[in-house]
Amino acid sequence: MEYGQFCPIAKALEIVGEKWTVLIIRELLMGGSRFNELQRGLCLISPTILNKRLATLAEHGLVLKKKLPGQQGYAYYATESCKQLLPVIKSLGDWGMRWARDGLTDRDFDVGLLMLYLERSIRTDQLIGEQTVIHFRFTDVSEMANWWIVATPEEVEVCHKDPGKDVDVYFTCAVRTMVELWMGDLSYRKALRAEQIKAVGAPVLTRDIFSWLSPSVFADLPPAEEIQ
């Protein structure tokens, strides 16, 4: 894709302007490196398109593709030029939070993406003990309604099959409710009072979930109608 212009914006868009490319960069900057990890954050992308976009980014020096030692497959790492796009991605997200949230539809509330973001948001240093298990039951999805997060000081893992471990906290709510809580559109205490979410477990974990779960980096931004 060429624009035939010397403008640096046009030249940048020749590299990052194709569909999915900015979201692939988002996933790389959020720590994704394996092909299946990138696919988790981009559920509608085809493997063929993901391969093509990664190859283009590697060709332009934004991604380094490396063979996994002792394993089949490759890992993809953001280079310095890719990392310098972080404030651009953040500014784009700021704009989207202010001006594009009214475009959300029910199809946008992807439970898999939500659980990936919650997995990345767990603050293991604020959890107590060697292991914490959190069970989510979503009332507005018929398939894959139950999810578990298993957190230890070393790692956090999301499961959509029962891991067979003792559960410390149970949350029951709609996917949209949990998204709105994490994105900062809904107060946790307000949701509890309105019974939009039910929380069962030790009070130290259920009283304020954001003591151990970091909210979205966009959570403090007001919608457009509040800043006009």
Image: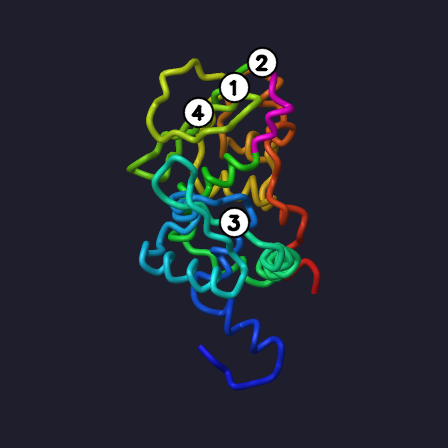
Q: Amino acid at mark 1?
A: Thr
Q: On the image, which quarter does residue 96 sit in?
A: bottom right
Question: What residue lies at 44% left-to-right and 77% top-to-bottom?
Answer: 1
- For the residue pair 66 and 152, the one nearer the viewer reads as 66
Q: Does residue 159 belong to the magenta stretch?
A: no
Tell me whether the residue at label 1 lies in contact with that at label 2, contact meaning CB atoms closer than 8 angstroms.
yes
Which span is picked out in magenta? 122-128
Instruction: Specify few, some or many for label 3: CA neighbours under 10 Å numbering under 14, 14-19, or 20 or more.
Output: many
Query: Gap between marks 1 and 2, in whole Å?
Result: 7 Å
Residue position marked by numbered label 2 in the rendering: 129
Point out which mark residue 77 bears. Answer: 3
Q: Is residue 68 left or right of residue 119?
A: left
Q: Residue at x 47, y 80 (%)?
A: 2
* Residue 80, label in figure: none
Residues marked 3 and 2 touching at CB (< 8 Å) = no
Return the x and y of residue 139 as percentages of the image width and height.
37, 34
> Is residue 224 depicted above or below 112 in this figure?
below
**Residue 36 at x, y percent in the picture:** 38, 44
Above or below for 71 versus 155: below
In magenta stretch: residue 127 = yes
Dots 4 and 1: beta carbons under 8 Å?
A: no
Real-space Cα separation, disc 3 to disc 4, in angstroms: 32 Å
Q: CA distance from mark 3 to mark 2?
A: 33 Å
Give the residue type that dot 3 points to: Tyr
